Image (cartoon, rainbow, N blue to C red):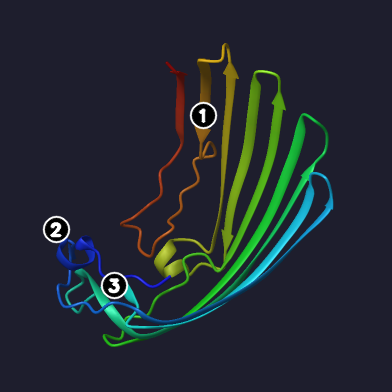
Amino acid sequence: MFKAPTADDMYYTDAYMKGNPDLDPESGHVENIGISHVFTPGTSLDLSYFNSDLHDAIAWGPDSTGIWTSLNLNEEKKHGLTLSWKQELSKQWSYNLGYSYTHTESDAKSGYLLHNSMPNGYRIGLHYHQGPWKANLEGRMGSGLDETYYGDHHYAVFDFNTSYAATDQLTFYAKALNFTNQAYSRYAGWNYPAPGRFFQIGMTYTF
């Protein structure tokens, strides 16, 4: 959970970002608690909660000139939970649902405060497996974002992939990532937009 400054944190430099060679390593404490329950074969529920209190937490933020730099925060308090449900509907079909909540509070030496990239996160997946065929439809949603930093207060991204195993060595596949072409950012600032719609068709062969 705790990290030492990376080479990028300390020395990365371009026209918009600058590392900080004087960073201190993070310190603090983290508590986790969780529970899992299997209702029937193929049906399970997982719940976990975490709480952390970090000193000298490493973060990136804009300085007085607008250049993004790495810095140590005085203190970062974070807590949250994750909830996931998985169920097999048949030998061919299954699905999963998930929710996560994260709340972050930061006391920054420079006045820069971390903003929650995704306070509320949601996941949904539908999966199919029959013989040589596999297919997955997955959705990733977020809500509660700060529009000032993320352009919108919510987003929903859907990915689809399928594959066909022609032999034990040869598999054909197709992917459609963010096929609704959702514009969103997982990091503060529209200088870092996530990838748009992407399609890929290919094959893999194992020797």
Residue 144 at what x, y percent from top left?
Answer: 56, 68
**Mark seen at residue 14:** 2
* Pointer 3 residue: 61
The crowd level at tag 2 (other Cα within 10 Å; few <14, some 14-19, many 20+) is few
Which of the two residues, 174 or 10, is positioned nearer the viewer here? 10
Nearer the N terminus, badge 1 or badge 3? 3
Left or right of residue 167: residue 60: left
For marks 2 and 3 on the same chain, the one whose residue lies earlier in the sequence = 2
Determine whether, in the image, residue 45 is placed left or right of residue 163. right
**Can I make out residue 106 in this image?**
no
The amino acid beneath tag 2 is: Asp
**Residue type pointed to by label 3:** Gly
Name the element at disc 2: loop
In the rendered image, which quarter contains the C terminus?
top left
Residue under pointer 1: 175
Residue at point 59% right, 18% down?
164
Along the viewing direction, whichever of 43 and 115 lies nearer the viewer: 43
